Image (cartoon, grey):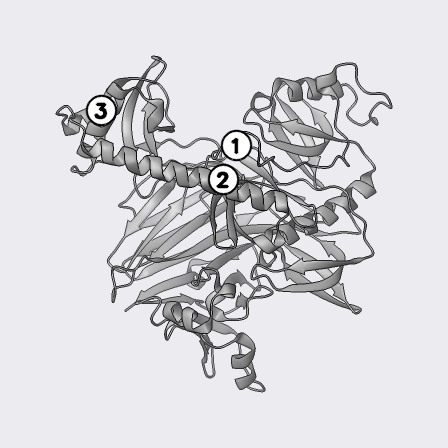
């Protein structure tokens, strides 16, 4: 499970390029266009082609094109402010480069990409804490012309070139690596896999990104191949050890032993006291005595005697209906299950047709749609999130759309697998308040919400419910239509208006082809979007209720077919801070 820090440490930092020239922009499917950069905000980029401006969602771009957009956006911030930036490193080795604003005895405030963030000093290295204290005496004065006398506190140049991870040096599969694109841009992320020509990475945010090798430098391709070799060796070793464990003669343990504190030792003879949670072929998950959050340790870290005990506990855990352990609520994190299939989720609902779970974030829900016609198929997943957004006007020349962050919860709900109605409320980072309501039963989900800004807020917040419908064909751009058909079959998307005829978008047909069939026909406000057919087994319908609501779809640039995914947005057209229960957003699961 990828850990999340409550402070922001970002997966890439880019600060130097020149505007006024054509750039090659690549979307997530590998399609390229050449255009000038105009501007960008947190969610979109505006480019210019032959004098025509085009707005693209950042999520529709490849990882490196998104990095270029952030780089050019950051460049404008640096050019506007003309202030020194510094490297700030946390205790896990992750670095952001940001401008110093000020500090207190416990935090340092920095400006990254035009937005202020507070970083707890306790989460920073001693070097970064020293730097914060050194700069704290004069937060608004320019940096000295000569380097500071202490070498480790010297800020690095904001134009310093980021070096990629050396593929011939020591490599660690669990560490973040720096990947360099063919154009020389860096991306900091962990390696997951390399299949055919697709490199799969995971960023510090826990977001997976897929990069085609055509967009990578020779260094990055070589790094990917070396890490794949290590990963293959790891899998082979884990498979061999799993076979060895299956032949172990283990002591007899009871269900009660699963909840007892065990004395374990590592290969160096160091002892720990911990409670067993779960284990797979790679990792053992434990609760250390006196700690409320679980840790994951590789099997090979334990002594042979402890491995035998852990294997006995693992086998017993598979035969009993064990109550999942709970990670308690803390700060901006809800209580959540610490082990089992719903690890990291606060509220879980399971039914014959689907499962749904509310994340520890309190603002996102995941749906697993089961295929009743073919239960052997893995479920299709969908994401639904509450969004609180505002327009940042701190720079009059460049307004940006940003999200309000949750800073704390009021009476946070306990982790549960039995609750049908969940209310999550709390405070936002501008002093505003919010309330998210989710009701789940065998038929589906109903979501509604409200929020308020503090008195005098000059940048009002709007609330929306956003749905992500992922693509269902892996590496679709490298597959023939015959291969694609084995995934999509008769799958289709049906859009129904509040009045008038529905529009059917077969998955095998391009958006542009189907849209041409309906050219000239009126289509009023959208009432529902339904997915059906071979890929799903059951139908899933996303629905508006009541009048006055704005419900629309968005197809990212470069997504040619419906099976490549789309997104939906639901908001109140007349009262942007309220989605009332009588006009809630509904998700119905139908046979």
Indicate the position of residue 218 as horizontal and vertical percent values: 62, 46
- What is the quadrant of the C terminus in the image? bottom left
Residue at x-position 74% and y-position 55%: 39
Indicate the position of residue 324 as horizontal and vertical percent values: 27, 36
Mark pair 2, 3: CA separation: 30 Å
Residue at x-position 43% and y-position 39%: 231
Residue placed most toward the observer, 157 or 114 = 157
User: Given contact means CB atoms under 8 Å apart, are the residues at marks 2 and 1 in contact?
Assistant: yes
- What is the quadrant of the N terminus in the image? top left
Q: Give the residue pinned by disc 2.
A: 227
Mark pair 2, 1: CA separation: 7 Å
Question: SS class of the residue under badge 3?
Answer: helix
Res. 102 image quadrant: top right
Indicate the position of residue 587 as horizontal and vertical percent values: 38, 62
Q: Give the residue pinned by disc 3.
A: 308
Q: Nearer the viewer, mark 2 or mark 3?
A: 2
User: Given contact means CB atoms under 8 Å apart, are the residues at marks 2 and 3 in contact?
Assistant: no
**Going by the image, does 545 lie left or right of 339?**
right
């Amino acid at each position: 499970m990828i850990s999340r820090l409550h402070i922001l440490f970002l997966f890439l930092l880019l600060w130097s390029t020149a505007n006024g020239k054509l750039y090659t922009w690549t979307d997530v499917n590998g399609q390229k266009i050449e255009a000038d950069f105009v501007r960008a905000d947190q969610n979109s980029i505006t480019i210019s082609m032959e004098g025509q401006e085009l707005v693209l969602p950042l999520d529709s771009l490849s990882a490196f094109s998104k990095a270029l957009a952030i780089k050019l956006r950051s460049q404008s911030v640096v050019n506007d402010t003309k202030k020194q930036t510094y490297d700030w490193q946390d205790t896990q080795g992750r670095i952001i480069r940001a401008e110093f604003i000020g500090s207190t005895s416990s935090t340092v405030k920095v400006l990254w990409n035009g937005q202020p963030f507070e970083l707890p000093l306790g989460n920073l290295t001693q070097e970064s804490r020293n730097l914060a204290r050194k700069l704290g005496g004069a937060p608004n004065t320019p940096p000295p012309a000569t380097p500071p006398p202490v070498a480790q506190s010297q800020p690095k140049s904001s134009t310093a070139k980021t070096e990629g991870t050396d593929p011939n040096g020591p490599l660690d599969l669990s560490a973040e690596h720096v990947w360099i694109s063919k154009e020389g841009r860096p991306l900091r992320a962990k390696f997951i896999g390399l299949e055919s020509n697709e490199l799969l990475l995971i960023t510090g945010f826990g977001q997976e990104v897929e990069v085609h090798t055509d967009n990578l430098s020779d260094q990055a391709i070589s790094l990917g191949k070396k890490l794949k070799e290590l990963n293959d060796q790891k899998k082979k070793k884990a498979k061999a050890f799993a076979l060895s464990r299956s032949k172990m003669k283990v002591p007899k343990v009871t269900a009660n032993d699963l909840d007892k504190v065990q004395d374990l030792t590592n290969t160096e003879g160091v002892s720990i006291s911990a409670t067993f949670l779960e284990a797979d072929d790679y990792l053992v998950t434990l609760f250390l005595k006196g700690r409320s959050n679980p840790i994951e340790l590789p099997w090979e870290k334990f002594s042979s005697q402890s491995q035998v005990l852990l294997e006995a506990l693992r086998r017993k855990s598979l035969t009993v209906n064990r109550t999942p352990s709970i990670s308690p609520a803390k700060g901006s994190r809800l209580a959540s299950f610490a082990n089992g299939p719903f690890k990291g989720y606060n509220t879980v609902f399971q039914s014959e047709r689907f499962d749904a779970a509310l994340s520890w974030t309190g603002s996102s829900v995941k749906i697993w749609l089961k295929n009743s016609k073919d239960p052997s198929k893995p479920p299709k997943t969908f994401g639904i999130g509450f969004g609180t957004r505002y327009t940042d006007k701190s720079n009059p020349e460049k307004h940006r759309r940003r999200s309000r962050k949750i800073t704390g919860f009021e009476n946070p709900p306990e982790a549960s697998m039995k609750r049908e109605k969940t209310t999550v409320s709390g405070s936002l980072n501008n002093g505003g308040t919010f309330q998210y309501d989710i009701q789940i039963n065998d038929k589906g989900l109903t979501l509604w919400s409200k929020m308020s800004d503090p008195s005098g807020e000059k940048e009002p917040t709007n609330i929306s419910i956003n749905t992500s419908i992922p693509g269902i064909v892996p590496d679709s751009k490298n597959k023939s239509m015959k291969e694609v058909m084995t995934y999509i079959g008769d799958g289709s998307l049906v859009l129904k208006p509040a009045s008038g005829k529905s529009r059917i978008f077969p998955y095998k047909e391009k958006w542009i082809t189907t849209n041409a069939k309906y050219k000239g026909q009126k289509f009023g406000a959208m009432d529902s979007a339904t997915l059906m057919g071979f890929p799903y087994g059951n139908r899933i319908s996303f629905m508006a209720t009541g009048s006055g609501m704005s419900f629309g779809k968005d197809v990212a640039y470069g997504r040619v077919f419906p099976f490549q995914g789309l997104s939906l947005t639901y908001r109140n057209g007349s009262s942007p801070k309220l989605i009332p229960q009588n006009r809630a957003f509904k998700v119905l699961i139908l046979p």
